[in-house]
Each structure stands twice: as structure tokens, then as C-alpha cells.
Image (tube, grey):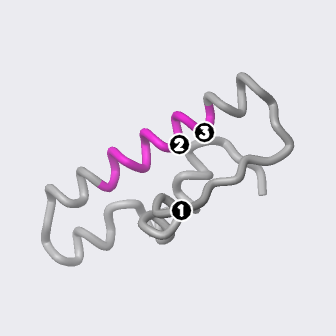
Amino acid sequence: MQCGDFARFAGDAVAAEVVNGAVEGIATGLAGLLALLDPEAIVVGGGLVAGLEPWWDAILDRAGVER
């Protein structure tokens, strides 16, 4: 399932654009952290995780995270 699919089901193109932008921004930030610090793990918590749970696979894929 693509990032904006949930919003597209509701017919809300603006919501899909917002979600896709958030996913892209978070993925870019994670990719930057991985490239700069080369950590063994990154722990993400709080409202960010709860709010974007349906899109974490897309975020991790775009960030290049191996699972």
C-alpha cells in the first residue's frame, strides 16, 4: 500500500499530499541521521509513531533502512 492510499480512499487529495510530504520528510531525516552517525539503532517514539504507524514501512523503505 502506498503512503497516500488511505487518504485517496476518502477522496481527499490534499490529505494524501500532506501525508506523502510527511513521509518524505521523515524518511529524509532518518536517512540523514543514518548517513551522518551510522548508529546501530534509532528509537522513535511518542505521537510521531502513533500518528504515522500505517506508513512506517514506506518511511523505512524510502530511508533505506534494512530490516
In the image, what residue type sits under mark 2? Ala
> Which is more foreground, mark 1 or mark 3?
1
User: For the residue labelled by badge 3, is the local secondary structure a helix, a strand or a loop?
Assistant: helix
- Magenta segment range? 19-31
Q: 33 and 2: which one is in front?
A: 33
What residue is rendered at 33% in x and 45% in y?
Answer: 21
- Percent across and percent down for residue 44 are 63, 54
In the image, what residue type sits under mark 3? Leu
Q: CA distance from mark 1 to mark 3?
A: 16 Å
- Percent across and percent down for residue 56 are 55, 61
In the image, what residue type sits under mark 1? Gly
Q: Are marks 3 and 2 in contact (CB under 8 Å)?
A: yes
Q: Residue furthest bottom?
A: 10
- Report which quarter residue 29 is drawn in: top right
Which quadrant does the C terminus fall into? bottom right
Q: Which residue is mark 1?
A: 46
